[in-house]
Each structure stands twice: as structure tokens, then as C-alpha cells.
Amino acid sequence: MRRPSIPGLVLADGWLAPYQGEIQARLRLYDAQLQRICKRWGSLLDCANGFTRMGFNRVASTGEWVYREWAPGARELYLIGDFNNWDRTATPMQRNKDGVWRVKLPADALHHGSRVKVHVVGADLEHRDRMPAWIRYTQQDEKTFDYCGVIWEPEQPYKWKHTRWSPTRVKTPFIYECHIGMAGEDERIHSYREFADNVLPRIAELGYNTVQVMAVQEHPYYGSFGYHVSSFFAPCNRFGTPDDLKHLIDTAHGLGIAVLLDVVHSHAVKNVAEGLNNFDGSGGQYFNAGERDSRHPDWDSCLFDYGRDEVIEFLLSNLRWWLQEFKFDGFRFDGVTSMLYYHHGHEPFTDLGCYFNTRVNTDAVTYLQLAASLVQQALPGAFAIAEDMSGMPGLCRPVDEGGFGFTHRLAMGLPDYWIKLLKEKKDEEWSVGDMWYTLTNRRYGEANIAYAESHDQALVGDKTIAFRLMDAEMYTHMSCNTPSMVVDRGMALHKMIRLATLAAGGEGWLNFMGNEFGHPEWIDFPREGNGNSYKYCRRQWSLVDNELLRYRFLNEFDKAMLELAQDAALLSAPPAQPLNMDEKNQVMAFERAGRVFVFNWNGERAIPDYLLPAPAAGEWRVALDSDDASFGGFSRQDHGVNHFTDKNQRLSLYLLPRTVMVLERV
């Protein structure tokens, strides 16, 4: 393919001109890898069809089973399981020149529920029982905690009931981030079906159109939040069966909700018994070899070798598997910053050169470009969201321009900013200029998912915004009949912070489950340090359902906030434009999608007759007021009377302390 002499990324952003050569070099690497893939497999989509070639598959004409496993360094492989009474030498496999081992079994040798493993005699001469790399379901023995691969072939395959989500139905993502196991109120692990039946209706009622599901890929340690994956093609058995997960996704589609998988291709669990680590005994294979490059310094996990063809086939096929078999509607790619740089994000990004030097992992760059391209080929219009805190230029620009092809980037600096502000500064020290810069500073032409807090801020050791604002008083003063200045302040700022972030922070929105109503406390998974307790690993929906408690007011504001944003097509509109940044009065006003947002961050001063330039002359009405009694406010203003601009196209407004008003033209 002939590329333009100047990449589109450089044409769109002149500051990147000094790095034109590096961007072109990335495109050449991508083109070369894609050419190799097409020469071997025919197309990128065919390369990502590896699950039809590897692992357990039936021969269409005879029904016989064929099991294949890539283990180039291994000396011997044997398939073991219920079918041969776990005899480690009864069923040997044969190796081809590419290091792929194969065995054929009669059609009736394996059936639905059959347990299997593969016995590997590695390059290191060690004998190990391993989980098949491409296994599609696993089970764990309740007594020994040993994992087995399980053949999933029910007599009646799952029958889909609802039409799949399509990009024409969900153009702007309003994302509800969730974890299935902790999505119920009981002190236990909850299921896919419980989530579908009990939680999805709440999400739909609030107005979210996208669910981002964490911890779906199988992981041996519950407390890892699903980020130490062992079996990449298997849905987590703790929450139910593959059909249960399909029921969840099917139910979401019936409610008009898209479902994203929080996919982990940035690293893998180091466990040998359950995972891929040292599968063939060579010390590398799927992962980088050598002590320095093989382990993540923070996560103590294995790092993929993105320069190896078989690893690319495995990971790309993993993406297509979840899209095709389970009808996911896209992905949130975890740990992209860690993938992009050999320093995994531990070095500062002081100038543009940091994104184009030798500390960038070019193999990972090429893989991410291929992955984003594949997602769009497999499901045009699908979401592909990158978790990147580095600000890599072009991450959300088309690959043909020299970008990576992702649809959105998580605006990770926003929650960090709010937590830092709440921790380090008094209310009267808050600068609306700093706030505005943080909310609106993003790369030109690249869509951001804005959020004030995600699961990261809810984990033990940190605090959610609500808990940081109200802390102990959430235990004693959330009753509607119990006055509290701390709770009044906390609820007011909770609403303002979330609306400011949504309205000005990006082109999409994300909320972690429960944060919409200020869920108290943190998330702490059962572990040795807490007596394996589930007390803090659940969501207390009864709090928001209790009409005597104030949580319901925050929930109602969240619903109203989303309704306003969707009715106005707010997040698909051009970025917010400032109308007034008044440091003295701590007033921040801006316009987006024809709506005027006016925040008075001052906690003490009401300002009568505040003059504000309007984006258009005429009559304006209040569309949303955080002080409304239905949101836990005091309804101190009468909005039965509309506002008119004066001869200088200004609005005269009465601004109450710690409130936000949204105005729209009549």
C-alpha cells in the first residue's frame, strides 16, 4: 500500500511534524505485519479465526474431535482427562514443523462437561499438567481448588432472543462500569443471571446505554479484580456458565444497552498450573524471555511478546471470539500505557519526544493497531476504548493517518485531579481556571471518555468522591430527617463534580456501579487480611431504594443529568466553550450543544444579578438545577419565570452557593 508523503496525523497536528519519520516508520511496520498476516492466512479476519484451528474443534464431516496446541519448545504432549482416566501417556500428540501439536479423537470420546488437561514434557524436562491454552470453559474443584478445562457443547445451544446492538442505536457511550460478582447485596459472589435480572433494569432506568463488564476472562484469584487472566477464551466460572453470560448480554441488548468487555491483553497471570506461563518449558513462548522483560514490575505478571506471530494470532483471535461467540459490542483495553512503553508508564512524559523514542515498544504499537483494525472489521462501529494515561498522540485517530484506530481514550487525569483537589485544597482555594484547563485539555480530534471516578477510586486504600466528602457522616447522617452541613456540602459537590466532568470532559461518560448514588465505603475483596470477608465486596442497593435516606437524591440527579445530556446530544457536540471563568467569585460558566452551564463553586456566597454573556439572544429557561428538592437540594429558586438577555446579550442570574444550573433556549 502506498502511503501519503505526510501522514494525516501530522497534517492534523503540526506539532507532530518533527516526528513525521517515526510515524511513517510505525506505518511501515504495520503494513509489513499486515502483509505477512495476509500472506499466511488470507486476511486479518482469517488470522483472527484461530479458535477454529486451535484448541478443541470437531471435524465437520465426521464429528471427530481434533485438539491442537502450540508448544514449540516442548518435548512431548499428551491429552489427558475423564475420557482416558487421566492416564498421562495414553493419548500422545504429534508435532508439526511449526511447533503445533495435534491429536484426533473419536466423535464420542468427548462430550459436554468432559474435563480435560494437557500433560506437557517441557524443554526444561519438567512434567506438568497444564490448562489447554484455547479452552473455552473451566471449573475449579471446591476441595483441591484445582482448575480443569471443560468441554462446553450443550445439547441445545443458547438461542439468542434479541437483535444485536448496532452503532446506529448507541452512538455516544454512557457507560456503566460493573463487576458481576460484587453486583448484589448479599455477602457472597453473585451471578451473570442475577446481574441480568436485577441490575440491568436499574442501569436502563438511569439512562445508561452501555455496560462495561469487568473480570469476565477467567482468573484464578478473585481479588485481582479480573486483571490476572489465566484462560483468555473462558468466561469466569465463578459467575456461571457461558450460556449464563450470553443471557446477560442478550438481556442487555433487549434493553437497548451495548455490552463492552474489559479485555486484558496487557499481561497475564504468572501461575503455571492455571495459566500460560512457561507453557512449553522454554521460559518464554507467549511471553518475553529473560528476567528483566518477562515480569511486570508492579503487577508481578507475565508480559506478552507482541512481536511473535503466534502470540498475535492468539490475541487477535481472542478479540474475535468474544465478539462472535458472545456478541460483545466492543472492548475497553486494559493497561494500554503499560503495553506501549518498556518503562510501563514509570517515566515522565515531559515532551512529544517521549512518545517516539526507543522506550516505546514498537511491537506493541503494531499489535494495538492490528487489534483496533480487527475490531472494526469484525463489527463496524464497535467501541474500542484505550486505558492510556500517557497521552500517546494518535491513539484515537485512524491507522491510515498514522494513528492507532481506537474510538475513545479514558480521560484518566480527571479522577486524579478531583481526588487531588479534595485532598489538598480547601473549598475557597479551588481555581475555576485550573478546573477548566483540566476538564478541556485533550488531544485535538481524539474522543475521550470522561469520568469523575471509576473502580480505581473505589478500591480499599482509596476513597470514592462521596466517601471522601462525607466520610463517617455517611453512617450517621444520611437520613432525610437528620440535618448535617457535612452531608449537605458533600452532596452538593458530588452533583457538581459529576456534571462538570460529564459536560466538559469528553465525548463519552463512565460511572462505576453504585457511585451514581454515592455508595458508601470502599471495595475490599475477600482475602487473608480481612478474614476472607465479603462485607465490602458488594453493592448495597437497599440504600438507594430506601426513601428515608438521601442516596436516592443523588441517584435522581444522575438520571436527570444523563437525560439532559442525551436529549441535547451533548457529548457528540463540539467541545465546551468558556463563557466566564470568574476566579474571584469561583463561578465557572460554559456553553456546549447550545446549553449554558453555570457553576457557583463558592460555599458561602450567593450572588444576585450575576451578569453572564449568553451564546444567543432571547429567552432562556432552567433545564436543570442541582438545588432542586428532588435532588436533595432546598429548591430556593422559582424557575417558573424564564430569563431574557439584555441589550448586551447578557443573562442576569441569581447564583446560590455550591449549585449548578443548566439553561436552554426557549
Image (cartoon, rainbow, N blue to C red):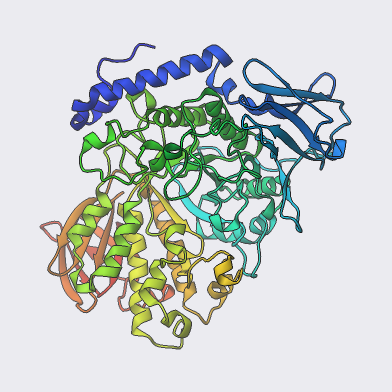
Q: Does residue 625 appear anywhere in the picture?
A: no
Point 18% across, 74% down: residue = 607
Horizontal and vertical percent position of residue 182: 59, 62
Q: Does residue 242 appear anywhere in the picture?
A: yes
Horizontal and vertical percent position of residue 304: 49, 35
Q: Quadrant of residue 336?
A: top left
Point out the image quarter for the C terminus: bottom left
Instruction: Establish if 55 lies above or below 614.
Output: above
Point 51% across, 31% down: residue = 375
Answer left or right for 642 relative to 529: left
- Furthest residue to the left? 648
- Furthest residue to the front? 125
Answer left or right for 625 relative to 318: left
Q: Quadrant of residue 609?
A: bottom left
> How many numbered marks appear?
0
Q: Quick one: 552 or 26, which is closer to the camera?
A: 26
Q: Quick one: 605 or 97, which is closer to the camera?
A: 97
Horizontal and vertical percent position of residue 559: 46, 62
Point out the image quarter for the N terminus: top left
Point 65% across, 35% down: residue = 133
Q: Quadrant of residue 128?
A: top right
Answer left or right for 127 relative to 304: right
